[in-house]
Image (tube, rainbow, N blue to C red):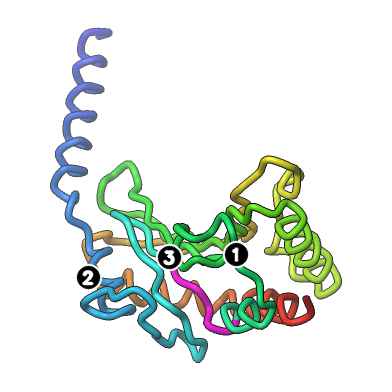
């Protein structure tokens, strides 16, 4: 009985491995090309849910993009963003959408996050984080949550969106991935607007 159970486990594990391998080519790349342009040109401007974004780069199952409103407010500060020169769009903030595959190798989910990045000035990073936290509490936007040590010296990357996942039934279906990505980004419009407002006050 014990031997049979172990064999069943090994067979199941092998099947999952085959499914994952079969789905190694997901629909993610096609989906982001549909959203951000077939050539995935850096700083390409696109519109999602009425808000405009800049394409900032991508990896296997991840795409980075920056709300143009954030960029404009950051530019108004007249600061050279030291430490961020080679980080995505070259600014201290970014949005990241990542696809994860479930154990069945067929379904999965998309996760959207916003991140304060590696600005070399600790005071600049800390000021941004504290301002966003304070404004989120005042506006009752509790999907903005930083880790307790986000503003501590030495931290370079601090993500701050919660309840930020949307399911995918089929990771090979680029149309589904595209639609769910747009829905997820649009759903967080209040949080994106709040960050833009905070940056505009600095």
The residue at the point 28 percent across, 44 percent down is 104
Rendered image quadrant of residue 134:
bottom right
- Mark toward the start of the polypeptide (1 vs 2): 2
List the residue tagged with mark 1.
81
| Residue 152 numbered tag | none
Can the viewer see residue 149? Answer: yes
Q: Which residue is mark 3?
A: 64
The prevailing secondary structure element of the residues shown in magenta is strand
- Residue 27: image x %, image y %? 23, 64
- In terms of depth relative to the viewer, which is nearer, 131 or 8? 131
Location of residue 86 (image quadrant)? bottom left
1 with respect to 92 (left or right): left
- How far across and how far down the image is residue 45, in percent? 40, 85
Position in image of residue 196 (x %, y %): 67, 79
Q: Which mark is residue 30?
A: 2
Does the image show residue 190?
no
Q: For label 3, count other residues whose C-alpha is less than 10 Å away and answer few (under 14), some (14-19) or many (20+).
A: many
The magenta stretch spans which residues? 64-69
Q: Residues within 10 Å of mark 1 (few under 14, many from 20)?
A: some
Q: CA distance from mark 1 to mark 2?
A: 32 Å
């Amino acid at each position: 009985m014990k031997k049979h159970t172990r064999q069943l486990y090994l067979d199941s594990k092998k099947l999952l491995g085959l499914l994952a391998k079969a789905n190694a080519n997901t629909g993610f790349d096609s989906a982001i090309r549909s959203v951000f342009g077939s050539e995935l040109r850096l700083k390409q401007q696109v519109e999602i849910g009425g808000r405009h974004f800049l394409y900032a780069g991508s990896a296997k199952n991840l795409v980075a993009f920056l709300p143009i409103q954030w960029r404009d407010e950051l530019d108004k500060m007249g600061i050279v963003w030291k430490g961020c020169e080679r980080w995505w769009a070259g600014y201290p903030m970014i949005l990241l959408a990542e696809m994860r595959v479930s154990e069945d190798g067929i379904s999965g989910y998309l996760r959207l996050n916003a991140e304060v990045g590696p600005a070399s000035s600790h005071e600049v990073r800390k000021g941004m984080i504290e301002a966003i936290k304070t404004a989120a509490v005042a506006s009752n936007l509790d999907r903005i949550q930083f880790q307790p040590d986000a503003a501590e010296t030495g931290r370079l990357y601090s993500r701050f969106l919660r309840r930020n996942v949307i399911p995918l039934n089929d990771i090979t279906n680029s149309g589904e991935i595209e639609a769910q990505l747009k829905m997820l980004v649009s759903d967080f419009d209040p949080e994106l607007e709040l960050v833009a407002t905070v940056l505009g006050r600095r």
